[in-house]
Image: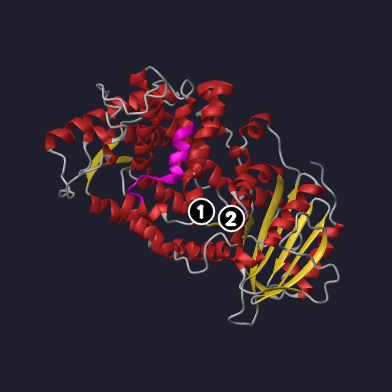
Amino acid sequence: MKRTANNTSMTKLRDIFLKCAVVTFLCCLLVTISASQNADQSAPEPSTGESSSAQPSTGQSPLEQPSATQPSPEKKISPAEADKLFRSVDEILQFASKDTGLPIKAKVKRRLVSRDEVEAYLKKNMQDDQDAKRLQRSELVLKKFGLLPRQFDLRTFLLALLKEQVAGYYDPKTKTVNLLDWLPAEQQRPVLAHELTHALQDQSFNLDKWMRPDQDLDAKKQITWADIVEDESSETRQAVVEGQAMAVLVDYMLQPLGQSLLTAPQVVAGMKTQMLAGSPDSVEFGHAPMFMKQALTFPYSYGLDFVVRLLAAGGKTRAYAGAFTDPPRITRQIMEPQIYLSGQQLPPMALPDFNHVFKDYDRFDLGAIGEFDVSMLLAQYVNLDVAGELAPHWRGGYYYSAYPKHKPNSPLGLLYVSRWSSPETAQQFAAIYAKALPQRYKQVQADPQDSSAVDLTTLQHLTGIHHWSTEEGPVVISVDGDTVMASESLSDAVTQEMQHELATAPASPH
């Protein structure tokens, strides 16, 4: 949702989360490896035998060891430890190059940074006025859809998350891997495997430029279907970048055990589960709304799955360099890698003339609603199981939000159109969307003029056109074949014009 000025608010969030999430995921990985090593033991108690450095004897990662005493003041690593850590960069870079097939083209600069320096770097990335506007814009639209609570403060949450989970990172602008002066060197080595993969990606494909395709919907007066498709590219490209880095991290951790990503699939499964749970110290992340958890972990969890599928189908070249030269374009291709591998493309959707339909409105925001976004709507409105069943039937969608001209303090108007694999799945989604209205509005009443009013408590499939009133204005949901349209807080003229546009649009094959 929402991409502007070659980037998006949510991509910015993920980019920052990249800098602070790796240690948390490392904890998860260590626990998973420990569990998988002990999986064939019948005794319920943890093993008390000698364990390797990748398997703490307590079954926990070193970062999760319980302490019976009060936490001691943060200890800085010694100059000798720092020197050893610096020297390990080249060794781990060689491993990452061999694991990915990406060549080493230059020496990677390395720098030891303090916690304060890392926090300052991340906060600086949030202080740009343009990014602040994107953040605010995404926040309002997400709240309108019900994906964030109305009282949720996205900026406050993000700052708290940064303070909680700050970690090392690779900076593509300075070509430097930043190491931490407060974390034991051995615990940073797997993190280096992740971050140095980014360095290799950068050396071959100019990571900063590749991650930001030249796409600015705000600057375009006429929006095409190609623009809508391209609108998800920042999510998919980040999934490629993070999925590859996570794959190398897993391979690096499994190497002493004689295993790899492809020979230990249980590690990936366990890791994905624990990504969403977070570590015991991840209080802010643990309390985050479901959408935030899923959105922030999407490029790591789904990206890792995507890389695994490409490795199995075409080896290293296909999974690493190939994913850069032929990147996925929509989240459906990341979530369902067979779609990407088969080259299957969605047929275009006919778009209305937004400038004409919304001539009495000022555009606020527009963009794609992809399969990931739809899965989050379904998970929020019902549950993750329903999302997993119905979201793969998504076949395209977009939204347009606007404020009426010369009417200050009016609620944000929202148009949402989605296409589905069949009329039946469209009707099922429309029913779920309608039943969720009381979750999103304080007052929802069926329009007395609606002769086909439905009972939202028992609704399973929705057909035809239905009207409701809310404290933010009218809501109209209409189903026409495989297409669902929702008009919220918009004028009758806009809604009727959109219904006409959709009714006269040419049908597209699936």
Q: Is residue 275 magenta?
A: yes
Question: Which label is found at residue 214?
Answer: none
Left or right: residue 163 compared with residue 510? left
Instruction: Pick whichever of labels 1 and 2 is earlier in the sequence.
Output: 1
Magenta residues (range): 269-282
Pick the front one: 261 or 340 = 261
Q: Quadrant of the N terminus?
A: bottom right
Q: Amino acid at mark 1?
A: Met
The Cα–Cα distance between marks 1 and 2, rounded to whole angstroms, is 8 Å
Q: Is residue 331 visible?
A: yes
User: Residue tagged by mark 1?
Assistant: 290
Task: Please state the horizontal and vertical placement of residue 311, each as a whole percent of the image.
Answer: 53, 24
Tag 2 secondary structure: helix
| Residue that extends furthest to the top in the rendered view of this protein | 258
Colour pattern of the rendering: secondary structure
Residue for point 59% across, 66% down: 144
Check if mark 1's residue and mark 2's residue have beta carbons within 8 Å. Answer: yes
Left or right: residue 505 compared with residue 416? right
Q: Is residue 216 magenta?
A: no
As drawn, 391 above or below 109: below
User: Residue tagged by mark 2?
Assistant: 380
Pick the front one: 419 or 401 = 419
As drawn, 481 above or below 107: below
As drawn, 480 above or below 305: below
Residue for point 36% across, 33% down: 31
Mark 2: few, some, or many residues within 10 Å (few <14, many ≥20)?
many
Q: Amino acid at mark 2?
A: Gln
Circle count: 2
Task: Please state the horizontal and vertical placement of residue 220, each as a whole percent of the image.
Answer: 64, 60
